[in-house]
Image (cartoon, coloured by chain):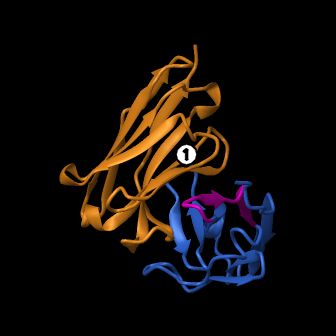
């Protein structure tokens, strides 16, 4: 059974940093692209970032480019999101999601975690 | 990276069919066959319903179907049931290692 468990969220002041983690199990982690998707309270889904199976390809939404960095540790079956220079508009539930395609970057998000909440406020 | 355009709401009576549109550009929906659809119940994580425009993951009822014409993708729910009442989102690969979601559609079963 595929499981994705996010952690690391919390309350942080504007301008500060936070690192999110996602622990994966139930599938061969190093064969799949992974993504972060966020959802502000009462709002829709927003793709944040993706990283392919060997970390050779990454992508970022314009809204986070230059501030957020995605990474993965295949030996630990873990995905990370380093978030710097946080802003109030980054307040959201952050989901970790698995890509559906084996060793490709174009797929759908077929499994999701339950999310970790990030609140940016002074 | 502009969001895909979905109608804010859609509705239909039990047993009827309803179609939700998702309009993008030639740089996303029109340029790739990597459109997917998600169902999200309140307080829950999204669930993949359709991938690669019209493919259904195992376990998704065949009442759900997808299609695409030009820059617009569509999700059709046939034989509407009460449990289909919730939010639906489309997504597309948008080139340059980026993805984009639609704003979401709230489906009401009358």
Magenta segment includes A30: no
Seen at 20% across and 49% down, the residue is A76
Q: Residue at x 58, y 61 (%)?
A: B96
Q: How many marks?
A: 1
Residue A72 in sight from this viewpoint = yes
Chain coloured blue in the rendered structure: B
Chain letter behind tag 1: A
Indicate the position of residue A88 as horizontal and vertical percent values. Answer: 63, 26
Residue at 18% across, 53% down: A75
Residue B8 quadrant: bottom right
Is B98 situated above or below A110? above
**In the foreground, A85 or B16:** A85
Per the image, the residue denoted by label 1 is A38
Above/below status of A79 relative to B75: above
Q: Residue furthest bottom?
A: B62
Q: Is residue B86 among the parts visible in the rendering?
A: no
Whether B38 is drawn above or below B72: the answer is above
Residue B101 is covered by the magenta coloring? yes
Q: Which stretch is magenta?
A: B95-110
- Quarter of the image that includes the C terminus of chain A: top right
SS state under label 1: strand
The picture's colour for chain A is orange
| Crowding at mark 1 (Cα within 10 Å: few <14, some 14-19, many 20+) | many
Q: Position of residue B83 (x, y in %)?
A: 59, 67
B68 shown above or below B103:
below
Image check: A92 left or right of A5? right
Q: Is residue B38 left or right of residue B21?
A: left
Q: Is residue A73 left or right of residue A90?
A: left
Locate the N terminus of chain A by quadrant: bottom left
Q: Nearer the viewer, residue B67 or B99?
A: B99
* Residue B46 position in % (x across, y down): 52, 58
């Amino acid at each position: 059974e595929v499981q994705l468990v996010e952690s690391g969220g919390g309350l942080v002041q504007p301008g500060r940093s936070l690192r999110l983690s996602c622990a994966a199990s139930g599938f061969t982690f190093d064969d799949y692209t992974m993504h972060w998707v966020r959802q502000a309270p009462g709002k829709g889904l927003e793709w944040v970032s993706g990283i392919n199976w060997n970390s050779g390809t990454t992508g970022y939404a314009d809204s986070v480019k230059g501030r957020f960095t995605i990474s993965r540790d295949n030996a630990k079956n873990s995905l990370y999101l380093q978030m710097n220079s946080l802003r109030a508009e980054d307040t959201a539930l952050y989901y970790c999601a698995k890509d559906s395609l084996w060793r490709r970057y174009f797929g759908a998000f077929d499994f999701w975690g339950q999310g970790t909440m990030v609140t940016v406020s002074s | 990276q502009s969001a895909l355009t979905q109608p804010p709401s859609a509705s239909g009576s039990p047993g009827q069919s309803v179609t939700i549109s998702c309009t993008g550009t030639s740089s996303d929906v029109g340029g790739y066959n990597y459109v997917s659809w998600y169902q999200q119940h309140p307080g829950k994580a999204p669930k993949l319903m359709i991938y690669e425009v019209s493919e259904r993951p195992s376990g998704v009822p065949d009442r759900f179907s997808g299609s695409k014409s030009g820059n617009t993708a569509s999700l059709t729910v046939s034989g509407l049931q009460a449990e289909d009442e919730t939010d639906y989102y489309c997504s597309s690969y948008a080139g340059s290692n980026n993805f984009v979601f639609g704003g979401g559609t709230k489906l009401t079963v009358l």
